[in-house]
């Protein structure tokens, strides 16, 4: 199915409005490759018809298929290694100590744009190594993504041999997965730590409450500058004062001004929120 220039404009604008993902002309091949099968399955003869069905006929199921198909779901267990080392050796132990001192036994983590779940499950496995089955801690990990297909797969928690080979060490596989017909399933005690929901990061998310750790990795790279800035500022609002933000390894937040304090741990950059000057003055009194 060929994409005309006029169709490129319509479809890229629709994708932007649905997901914030920016597709410039160099990404025409993505529209052709990923959306042509969706269009054909929906009985459309061309991309114009696809646009019309989603935008003017309000076909919600088709809209979800478009979002599922056009978003990039590339992920793997313990992606980039060093962020997970920083979590295990610095960030989580430090948070547990600080919280213990305040008798606060709750730890909330958010994997925003979790794709098919490898990221939040990797965090859950690290937490299991650190606090095991301690009943002292109330741990919850939220995985969210705009893609219904990704969230359905993440909730299933079943991974193919190929997906397991990408990042999962054999000893971790033995400890945290069981063999099932379809592949490897995350064991129940790890699944119990993680919940999933569909969420578009461009929409308000303050109602989720606050988090001690937010991982927002490899998603803002698809947004424009304003949406990216706005997203990280809104994430700051849901981070606890001692909380940590992890961005993707190629995503520097240093252009966001003084909102975040970058720190380097275990060869990875992590960010803590800077308090407004007034609050700082107050806390030194
Ligand atoms: C490349 S994956 C990153 C997965 C994981 N964070 C990682 O780093 O391995 C990007 C994910 O962002 C999701 N995404 C794209 N636009 C989004 C939006 N507006 N709101 C929430 N998720 C979005 C996609 O569906 C996709 O699963």
Image (cartoon, rainbow, N blue to C red):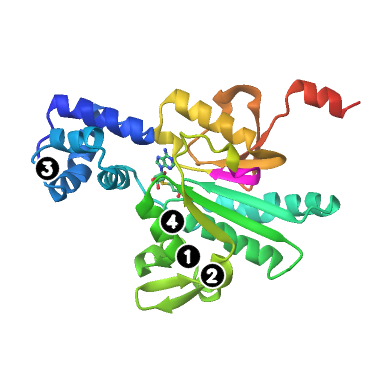
Task: Measure the C-alpha gap from mark 3 to mark 4.
Answer: 34 Å
- Residue that label 4 marks: 76
Q: Mark 3 or mark 4: name the one nearer the start of the chain.
A: 3
Q: Secondary structure at mark 4?
A: loop
- Residue that label 3 marks: 44
Towards the viewer: 10 or 80 = 10
Task: Measure the C-alpha gap from mark 3 to mark 1.
Answer: 41 Å
Residue extending farthest right: 285
Task: Measure the C-alpha gap from mark 4 to mark 1.
Answer: 9 Å
Q: Mark 3 or mark 2: name the one nearer the start of the chain.
A: 3
Which circle, 3 or 2, is nearer the viewer? 3
Q: Is residue 3 visible?
A: yes
- Residue that label 1 marks: 168
Which circle, 3 or 4, is nearer the viewer? 3
Residue stretch rendered in magenta on the structure: 208-215
Give yes or no for residue 169 being in the magenta stretch.
Answer: no
- Checking the image for residue 110, the label placed there is none
- Residue that label 2 marks: 172
């Amino acid at each position: 199915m060929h994409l005309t220039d006029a169709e490129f404009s319509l479809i890229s604008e629709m994708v932007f409005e649905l997901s914030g993902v920016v597709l410039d002309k160099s990404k025409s091949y993505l529209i052709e490759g990923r959306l042509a099968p969706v269009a054909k399955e929906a009985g459309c003869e061309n991309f114009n018809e696809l646009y019309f069905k989603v935008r003017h006929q309000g076909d919600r199921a088709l809209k979800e298929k478009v979002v599922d198909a056009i978003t990039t779901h590339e992920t793997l267990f313990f992606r980039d290694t060093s962020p997970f080392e920083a979590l295990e050796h610095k960030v989580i132990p430090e948070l547990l100590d600080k919280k213990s001192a305040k008798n606060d036994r709750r730890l909330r983590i958010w994997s925003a744009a979790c794709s098919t779940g490898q990221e939040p499950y990797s965090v859950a496995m690290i937490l299991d190594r650190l606090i095991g089955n301690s009943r002292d801690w109330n741990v919850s990990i939220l995985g969210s993504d705009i893609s219904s297909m990704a969230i359905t797969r993440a909730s299933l928690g079943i991974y193919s041999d190929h997906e397991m080979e990408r990042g999962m060490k054999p000893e971790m596989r033995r400890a945290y997965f069981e063999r099932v017909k379809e592949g490897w399933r995350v064991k129940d005690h790890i699944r119990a730590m993680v919940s999933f929901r569909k969420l578009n990061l461009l929409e308000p998310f303050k109602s989720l409450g606050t988090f001690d750790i937010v991982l927002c990795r490899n998603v803002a790279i698809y947004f424009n500058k304003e949406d990216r800035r706005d997203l990280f500022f809104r994430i700051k609002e849901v981070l606890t004062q001692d909380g940590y933000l992890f961005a993707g390894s190629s995503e520097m937040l240093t252009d966001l001004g003084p909102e975040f304090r970058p720190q380097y741990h275990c060869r990875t950059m992590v960010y803590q929120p800077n308090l407004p000057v007034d609050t700082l003055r107050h806390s030194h009194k």
